[in-house]
Structure formats: C-alpha cells, structure tokens
Image: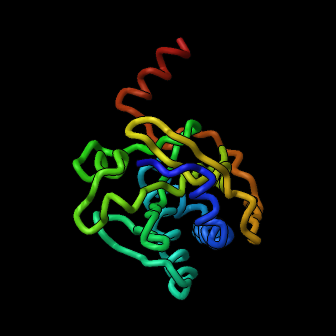
Amino acid sequence: MIPTESAVRSRLERIHPILADASHAAFQRWLKIPTSQRAALDHPRTFANVIWGFFCAEATTRLASESGITLTHKYNTLGIVVDDELMLRFKRVNRQGLSRNYATQTSLRFYGQIEIPGIPATCARAEIGWREDEVRLGLAALEVVMRDGKAVAWHYSILEEGATSVVPIVPATPITSRKTQVRTRGAAADRKRDRA
C-alpha cells in the first residue's frame, strides 16, 4: 500500500531540514575537491557515487541521535527508517523524479512496496531524490519521491528546507586553451593534406 503524500510529509516534517542540510553539505564537500581532481570524477556514475558517499556520511552524523530514526546499511545502501513505518534512501533522479536501477529482485521489491528480508512490507519505501544543477555546483532538485513500480506516484520538494546554502566556487583563472590534448594516429598527415 502506497502512503499518501500528506501522511509522509507529516511524518518527515521534523527531519526535512536535516535531510536538506546533509544534501547541501555533500555538495559542499564535492566543491572542496580541487577542480583538477574533480575532473577525474566527472563520469555521471562516479559523480553520483561520490555525492552518495558524502551524503551518507553527513546524514549518518546528523541523524544518529534523532529519536525514532534507525539507520540501516543493507543492500548496498543507507536506509533511513523513520518510526519503523517509512524507509528512505538517497538516489539521483531525472527531471521526472525517477532513479535508475538495475532490475534486481531487491529494487523491484523496493519500488513495488513488497517485503524485503529485514524490511517488512508495512514499512513503506521512498527516495530522497536529488539532481545536480547544470554545472555541478549545487542542487537543482531535492525531493521526497514515492514510486509505484516503474512510475512516480507523487513527489514534493524539500530543497529549501535546510539552512545551508551552497556557494559556487569559481576558478581564479578561467581555462582558455582549446588545444586538443589527445591526437589520433595520422593527425599530422591529415593536417598536411588539409593545408594542400
């Protein structure tokens, strides 16, 4: 059974600011990585994993002493269980609010609200969905997303709930060189032919 948005919203209201602050702090940690090192982490999957790792560390610290919150580390994710009735996990989502997962039995059961070993079916499951801005300097979206199988049942934003803001870090000297770093075989011959 999928809970209503209003029921979930009222259950999570007290931790919305904590979740938002942990998410913003994850991006602040991302921005502290030197630009040259961030470039090596630019692949979309790697980037998502780095942000997820930072969020897990920040959320664990912030939620550890909250009453009614249980943190689980099962199925390769951090589960945030609220009052034994709702489990959240942090996932990157697209503009429609959908996350991408391999169709494992666990992910199918998660989205279908079917019992997962150690997590009863009575404990509804939702995601804290995040999407980065176009230049990866902050969050464009942070929302609670409830799925019904492959579709989004409903979602609502918690982006503005936290007190933390992310200040973009702009490099002191802009990169102006447009020279090709990698040359293919025969590039010199191609240039000679083009000049002729």
Q: In this view, does 104 lie above or below 24?
A: above
Where residue 69 appears, x then y in whole percent?
A: 49, 78
| Residue plotted at (54% across, 60% down) | 38
Between residue 113 and residue 129, name the one nearer to us: 113
Residue at the extreme bottom: 65
Between residue 75 and residue 116, name the one nearer to us: 116
| Residue plotted at (55% across, 76% down) | 58
| Residue plotted at (46% across, 44% down) | 147
Where residue 95 appears, x then y in whole percent?
A: 59, 38
Between residue 114 and residue 92, name the one nearer to us: 114
Where residue 26 appears, x then y in whole percent?
A: 58, 68
Indicate left or right for 137 with 173 as reference: left
Residue at the extreme top: 196
Q: Is residue 32 at least partly visible in the picture?
A: no
What is the quadrant of residue 101 in the picture? Answer: top left
| Residue plotted at (26% across, 59% down) | 116
Q: How is the image coloured?
A: rainbow
Q: How many marks?
A: 0
Where residue 103 appears, x then y in whole percent?
A: 27, 42
Q: Is residue 5 at least partly visible in the picture?
A: yes
Between residue 68 and residue 150, name the one nearer to us: 68
